[in-house]
Image: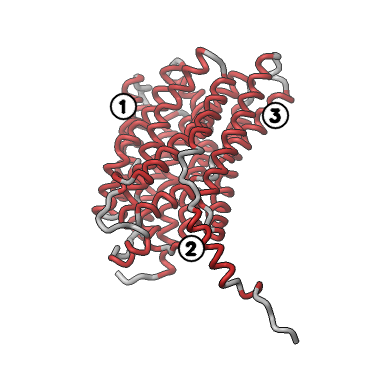
Amino acid sequence: MPVDNGHRWKVLGVGVAANASFSSVVGGLPATAIYMRATYQLDTTQLGLVLGVLGLGIAISEIPWGLLTDRWGDRPVLLTGLLSSGIALALLAVLALYTPTLALLAIGLFIVGLLGSSVNGASGRAIMAWFKEGERGLAMSIRQTAVPGGYALGALILPYLAHTYGFVQVFGASALFCLVASFFAWLWLYEPDFDGATAKKSGATPGSSPLKDSRVWRIVLAIGLLCAPQFAILTYAAVFFHDFSHVDITLVSATLAVIQIGAIVSRIWSGRWTDKHKNRRSYLKACAWLSALTFLLLGATVSIASTYGISQTPLASTLIIAVMVIAGISVSAWHGVAYTELATLAGASRAGTALAMGNTCVFVVLFATPIAASALMTHFSWGTVWLAAAFCALLTVPLFPRVDKAARGMRLFARVSHPAPETRCQPLP
């Protein structure tokens, strides 16, 4: 099929729609945690398990979906995943009529994770092909805004549906999101051929596998660990504010939505900024440091409020919300840049596998985080939960690749040797 440069924005739009539709499920269901706990009569440990198995299903299936994407292409994988996950969610809506047991609910969400994970790697490969090196950071960051965008959509809509109508409507609306996204994927998604020139420009060694690249694995592990603080907020913010500060659920939903909107803005800005300054690696390290510091502040604030018994006062609640918003945005701003660096290291023709590796680690963490947070909260305190999140962020600092000094020197030499037109010396009149 002939390449139409204008079509690349439709391809990007499909990637955004697909990721947003599934992310609204991943991000929206935890926001319904209070209603889910009451409707299905779950204790805290069972609630953590139910919220975690969705991530486990995604983690198990990410790399197989990524390998299939590199072999078959984005279009068949994305269509298969969106349609099948939409059907699975529709079946969960039918089961909700009868208030299924814990086992049925957990199995259903696990299957949704297995099928829906296809959207995470698919479309990223096409974006790497359609957009040039100087544009990929922005394009991939726009694609990654679909994740907080979907989380915000789910956090606003699904709790309202759960409270007003019930989980039949929650799962039914989620199924509809996926089916609508599959229609646009069928309409617009295709990718240009990957030839030797494309692979060469992307920096890949023909035939090399990201699974054997230690540089790729370092970024994969860093991405997963840095998602732990983000998932701690995503999965337990509603329960935390309800139990710790007695904050109204409407304010909790608004807080989560603000965090995700801030994540969208920061991801787009960071993608464009790092494209312009060629500083993805130093930016990733700075985000890791900032995330560690902000979650340390959140943990300290919560611990002090708990120690002095002021957690339910308006001042303490406002302060905790403000700190959580700052921490939540800072730990969400780096995704597009990290995935761009990951796909660039692997090369365009292997980007599906590389992105799947990153997402596998991310969703292993999504499975583990609710369980770990529940244990820390039960045996210690909420302050310990947020301090543990800060420690996870700190661990990622040495994992992100160091700035290549040789490459940085070459860029500096290029700027000195070939200054921008507006900075060159002009002859005297």
Decide which of tag 3 and tag 1 comes sooner along the chain.
1
Q: Position of residue 166 (x, y in %)?
A: 46, 28
Q: Quadrant of residue 329?
A: top right
Which of labels 2 and 1 is toward the front? Answer: 2
Q: CA distance from mark 2 to mark 1?
A: 43 Å
Task: Tell me the residue that label 1 is attached to.
Answer: 107
Decide which of tag 2 and tag 1 comes sooner along the chain.
1
Which kind of residue does numbered mark 2 sit on?
Answer: Gly
Depth order, front residue of 79/392: 392
Task: Tell me the residue that label 3 is attached to.
Answer: 319
Residue that appears at 51% across and 43% down: 148
Is residue 234 in view? no
Task: Tell me the residue that label 2 is attached to.
Answer: 134
140 over 258 or under it: above or below? below
Q: Position of residue 60 (x, y in %)?
A: 30, 35
Q: Residues within 10 Å of mark 3 (few under 14, many from 20)?
A: some
**Are the residues flagged by discs 3 and 1 in contact, CB closer than 8 Å?**
no
357 over 7 or under it: above or below? above
100 over 132 or under it: above or below? above
